[in-house]
Amino acid sequence: MNHAAPSRFLGSHEATASTPSPSASALPAAPRQGRDAARVHRQLPPPRAELRVCVIIPAKDEALNLPATLAALAAQTDVHGQPLPAGCFEVIVLANNCTDTTAAVVRQHARLFPQLVLHVAELCLPPARAHVGRARRLLMDEACARLEQVGAPDAIIASTDADTCVAPTWLAAIRAEIAAGADAVGGRIHSEISGDELLPLRRLQTRDTAYRLLCARLESLLDPNCADPWPRHYQHFGASLALTTRAYRQVGGLPEVRFLEDEALCQALRRHDLRVRHSPHVQVLTSARRDGRVEVGLSWQLREWLNMSRQYREPHVECPHQLAALWRVRRDLRACWSRRAGLPSNALAARLGLTLVALQVLVQQAATFGELWESIVATAPGATVALVPLSRALRELPLLIKPAQAAGRATSASQLLVHF
């Protein structure tokens, strides 16, 4: 499965010095047809008229993991524990470049779970296109076309992974967030690291999670987002990611990059000022394997952390003080943008390390605030954030977080982890 270069497990702002990044020149293109897309399409039956959600799963040699994944999807309920209406959602698995019985397992489970509308397509992609970005793009394009074919106004494309078990109310919670106004929903992704020999790895993962959640809390206080209010988390990855067909078309589809394709999609959504919700009600459990199927994913991150723990090295993360300053600038710039009355001030430009003229040019060139902020992060000297040891960041974050309005005390990492 599944973070500047944003790490797959970091939030919208985080960076690590060692995290690979997708090609910066890879921009989303409009969903399109092609030989691979046609081969996938021919293997699938027409969509049912009652279809409202299409769940897509790219799978490469996942015969062992898929049974639990499919069983979790077959057990989906509404918020009251009642089964979802038959046919309101379907699951499409793309068995790409498999050397095991992945496709046969899917067909077997289609018979085991007759209430689950389950399809599988098989594909062998050439080496240059044999990556998760291509596989997930093909699936999302097909899902979008199928949902548009039935003309559902509230249609949703939902993504998960073949080693992931979604919560029973996963789809119901996604639909509730979309109904409340979200264009896209990132779910909270949990993984369980077991075994005494992996205790240092589990401890490091817990500390990293605390850092991400504390950053999310600080960000929500300094630059509140009405489309993504607190409580929220920081993840928007392929193991639990959903968006409307309208949003998918608006951004031109999933960027086809070799890895971090989900992060690239979220960047495109923000660039278009679409509403991305990091919902604590949308939950999945994914495997903590370290031999993943993608170049950069959770397995890659776990291997990095395990090597660090064995070498007694500490991860470095973005400096909380500099992040706080950057979020304050973003808040003030957004206020200026929304008013559309007058241009940014010299003081605001100076905080970004830009001249007023340079900032004004960026403002005038941008069609959306997301586009403006993306340009600033890429070019403004004041948008650069240094890396600091994780232990230092964990000490500093609670001191930066405002006392809770009601309780009059700072939010602690342990309090955050209880809720997430």
Image (cartoon, helix red, strand yellow):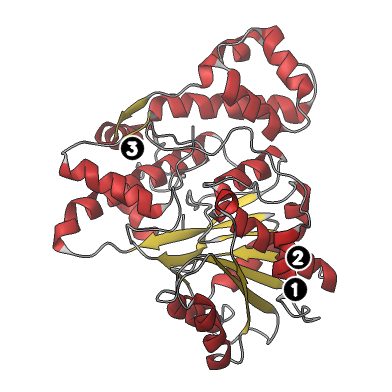
Q: What residue lies at 59% left-to-right and 64% top-to-bottom?
A: 124
Q: Is residue 207 above or below residue 64?
A: above
Q: Position of residue 286 (x, y in %)?
A: 41, 65
- Number of numbered markers: 3
From the image, tell me which residue sits under label 3. Answer: 398
Quadrant location of residue 46? Answer: bottom right
Please state which of residues 221 and 267 is positioned toward the viewer in this rendering: 267
What's under tag 1, amino acid-wise?
Arg
Numbered disc 1: secondary structure: helix
| Image side of residue 25 versus residue 99, left or right | right
Q: Position of residue 146 (x, y in %)?
A: 77, 70
Which image quadrant: the C terminus? bottom left
| Image side of residue 2 versus residue 267, left or right | left
Q: What residue lies at 18% left-to-right and 56% top-to-bottom?
A: 199
| Image side of residue 318 versus residue 53, left or right | left
> Disc 1 to disc 2, how far (Cα)?
6 Å
- Disc sitting over residue 66 in the figure: none
Mark yes or no: residue 151 visible.
no
What's under tag 2, amino acid-wise?
Ala
> Disc 3 to disc 1, how far (Cα)?
55 Å
From the image, tell me which residue sits under label 2. Answer: 38
Mark yes or no: residue 49 visible.
yes
Quadrant location of residue 63? Answer: bottom left
Please state which of residues 261 and 250 is positioned toward the viewer in this rendering: 261
- Cβ atoms at labels 1 and 2 below 8 Å apart: yes
Q: Position of residue 246 (x, y in %)?
A: 78, 56
Quadrant location of residue 83? Answer: bottom right
Please state which of residues 287 and 353 is positioned toward the viewer in this rendering: 287
Q: Earlier in the sequence, mark 3 or mark 1?
A: 1
What's under tag 3, amino acid-wise?
Pro
From the image, tell me which residue sits under label 1. Answer: 42
Q: Is residue 345 above or below residue 112?
A: above
